[in-house]
Amino acid sequence: MIVADGIYYALALSAGGVLVSWLTRPWFGVPLFILALFCLYFFRNPERAIPPGPVAVAPADGKVVAVKAMEAGATRISIFLNIFDVHVNRAPIAGRIAGVRYQPGRFLVASREEASTLNEQNTVTIEGDGTTVTFSQIAGLIARRVVFWKKPGDHVKTGERVGIIKFGSRADVLLGPEWSIEVAPGDRVSAGSSVIARRKRGI
């Protein structure tokens, strides 16, 4: 599967390549055809096997760059996406979308710690099964557009596709003390299929 945006970009670049080749020389259009192929690759949207049980899954593909203790026993997991990762985002847990908040901001390199608070982002809160999980789609140096396909009040399943961050970027997940963290900095995760935390028994 390919996100529709990727198809539109690829068609536009291919049309540009044809035009340039016709107006100049055939090989002058080659860079545009290569970019068209890259767009199809970048906007790929693969199927994923969603793990069962009381788990939280990664909302994005990428590398875990931080697992940080926050206030009130919460933990923030930060995932950095490079331009070669799948950029479709997925819901970390099942539940109702309680809120979506857009924050304008800067476009710092997404792997930097301050990107979590200073960069442009969408912050999404999901309530389900007695827990609340918040995750953020964070723009980066190259990614300057975050897209969320759902709206407050919608119900989502664990691992359901919910949005996309275009090009290199970051995703943060905030989990409460009722979760046992299953990842560490340096781990590679896949959206929807990698377990990043499990609910503690009796909580």
Image (cartoon, rainbow, N blue to C red):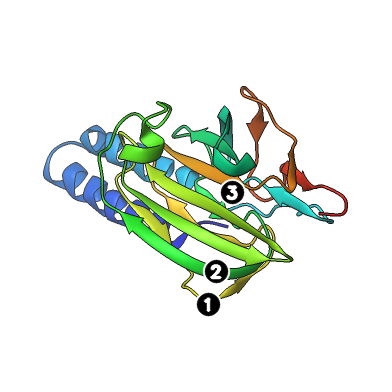
Precedes in sequence: disc 2 or disc 1? 2
Residue type indicated by callout 1: Gly
In x, y percent, where is residue 33? 33, 42
Q: Residues within 10 Å of mark 1 (few under 14, many from 20)?
A: few
In x, y percent, where is residue 59? 59, 49
The residue positioned 39% from the left and 32% from the top of the image is 110
Quarter of the image that includes the C terminus: bottom right
Precedes in sequence: disc 3 or disc 1? 3
Which mark, residue 153?
A: 1
In x, y percent, where is residue 129? 74, 66
* Local SS, label 1: loop
175 relative position to 148: left or right: right
Q: Which residue is mark 3?
A: 59
67 relative position to 152: left or right: right
Residue 49 makes an appearance in the image = no
**Residue at the left extreme, as displayed:** 23
The residue positioned 28% from the left and 40% from the top of the image is 32
Which mark, residue 97?
A: 2
Residue 148 makes an appearance in the image = yes
Q: Are marks 2 and 1 in contact (CB under 8 Å)?
A: yes
Quarter of the image that includes the N terminus: bottom right
Q: Of circles 3 and 1, which is in front?
A: 1
Residue type indicated by callout 2: Ile
